[in-house]
Amino acid sequence: MISKEVQSVLLFDNGKPFIVSSENVANLNCNNNLYHALLVLSQVKYSSIPVLDNESRIKGIISMPMIINAIMAVDSIRFE
């Protein structure tokens, strides 16, 4: 059981949880491609999401600017 003091720290002033349940967090697998990452991040309200390995261990964090920069760096894209 969580004490009232700890519980008050884990809740916003409006009483909604500060911590999001792990079942509700968007994430990517390290084997997903950039286009899948772009799709996921464009559909959620998070600015960045965790990247997990096949054992659900966190390998890193990815954000929309990181994805856009990586896509822009692809040699096949030519801006002429």
Image (cartoon, rainbow, N blue to C red):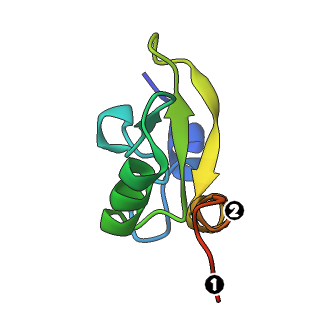
Q: Residue at x 63, y 68 (%)?
A: 72
Outermost residue to the top: 55
Image check: 60 left or right of 37? right
The image position of residue 31, as x and y in percent, is 46, 28
Three-letter code for the amino acid on which mark 2 is drawn: Ala
Label 1 neighbour load within 10 Å: few <14, some 14-19, many 20+:
few
Viewer-proximal residue, 20 or 75? 75
Q: Is residue 37 above or below residue 54?
A: below
Residue 74 in view here: yes
Three-letter code for the amino acid on which mark 1 is drawn: Phe
Ranked by sequence position, the earlier of labels 1 and 2 is 2
The image position of residue 44, as x and y in percent, is 35, 63
Q: Which residue is mark 1?
A: 79
Q: Residue at x 36, y 49 (%)?
A: 36
Q: In terms of secondary structure, where does tag 1 sit?
A: loop
Q: Are marks 1 and 2 in contact (CB under 8 Å)?
A: no
Q: Residue at x 41, y 46 (%)?
A: 20
- The mark lying in front, picked from 1 and 2, is 1
Q: Which mark is residue 73?
A: 2
